[in-house]
Image (cartoon, helix red, strand yellow):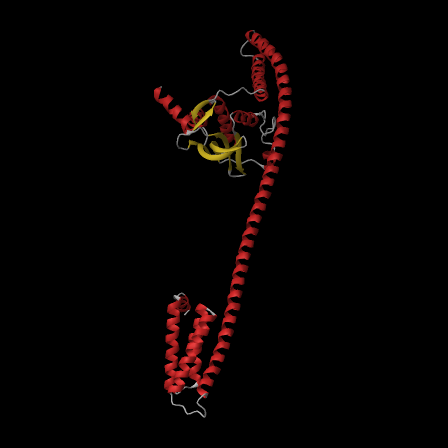
Amino acid sequence: MSRLLAGLSRLPKPWTIFFAVVLAALVGGLDYITGYELEVSSFFLVPICWACWAMGRKAGLLLAAVSVGFALAADVTSGHAYAHPAIPYWNALMLLGVFAVAVYSFTAFLVAYRSLAEAQSLLRNANERLEETVQQRTAALRAEIAERERAEKAKLHAERLLEKQAKLASLGTLAAGIAHEIRNPLTSVKARLYTLDKHLEAPSLARKDAEIISTEVARLENIVQSVLNFARPSEPELKTICAQDLLREVHSLMASTLDDRRMQFTVEPGPDQFISADTSHLKQVLINLVRNAVEAIETEGTITLRARRSRATLEERDTEAVILEVADTGRGIPPEVEKRLFDPFFTTKETGTGLGLSIAARIVEKHGGVLQYQTRVGHGTTFGIVLPLLGSQASGKKLDASTNA
């Protein structure tokens, strides 16, 4: 029905008038056949209202006049006997008045209805625009709040980093001075011990004591060297290297030391990804992480080396990165240890110096990267060296150099 009404409302005006007049003529014919009954005359309101609805008040008045003409013709030709010959014309005039009132009433209703519909449409559009504006401003406010929170976190992180760097700088200066002071007498002790060892008879208790002293002196020298490496790390000599090749070299170096242990040591295969790094420095970091993983596995487990590509924030820039991971299925890191994991001289080992991870983190920072980790107590730990990924141009140079070689 709604489609029919919509189709009728889209008819051209001449066709609307034509069909309305035809309908009025049909009602007039029906009025003539029935003998000019009042009930039939009321059907003239159908074409009249249609004309009002489709084209307005003027068209309705026109159809009212046409309908009255058809009604008068039907009345005159029907053969009714009236007391006065003017009565049919009086009836037609009264009918015209009724139709005129109907036209004005119906068109007034249409105007009010259309005004109400237009007002509702305007109100709906205004509500939609208001809701859209509220959503946009809410989203903008949330984004602003998130940006402020991010800025506050970045500021807090920067302040903590500066504070930590200041402490490390002071500690490094102090440690370097102490290490140099210890190294000189250690050198003298080692020289005298070498001279003494030549005059000792073997086997003897004195020689055993000398061997113990020599072992402890070597350990002290190792500690002093670790302190110096932490205090004044050497600058890396950066070269373009393949991350997968580096992991395979570390696996070859460490695999033989794990043969007598019940653990699997594997390298996950992956595509060649190139980084700018000092091979010897990164080997030092990876070997230290592998040793930590071995100590974290109490009986048997798995240590996995892998290189994967990801996005990371390095030096306050979001960039493509390569993550060199050392993953183990060991006991994980307890929360109380995790809080001080990178603190210098903090260790849970009986013979450790507590500088391994601190030195590793500083080496990675010298490469423009970060050392990160994920751990679950009872499930294992994964350390990741996050470094910038070299672009296709650098990779191409590396491949060309390998080909020429």
Front in this rendered view, residue 371 or 296: 371
Residue 70 quadrant: bottom left
Q: How many marks?
A: 0
x 63%, y 32%: residue: 159
Quadrant (top left/top right/bottom left/bottom right) for the N terminus: bottom left
Q: Is residue 255 left or right of residue 221?
A: left
Residue 259 shows up from this direction: no
Residue depicted at 61% across the width and 32% down the height: 158
Q: Nearer the viewer, residue 46 or 222?
A: 46
The answer to whether 154 is drawn above or below residue 193 in the figure is: below
In this rendering, the answer to whether 104 lies above or below 402 is: below
Q: Is residue 180 visible?
A: yes
What's the residue at 62%, 23% (across, down)? Answer: 169
Q: Looking at the picture, how far across and down is residue 175, in whole percent?
A: 63, 20
Give the residue at x 42% y 86%: 37
* 38 relative to 198, above or below: below
In the rendered image, the vertical position of residue 405 relative to residue 379, given as above or below: above
Residue 372 percent across, percent down from the top left: 53, 33
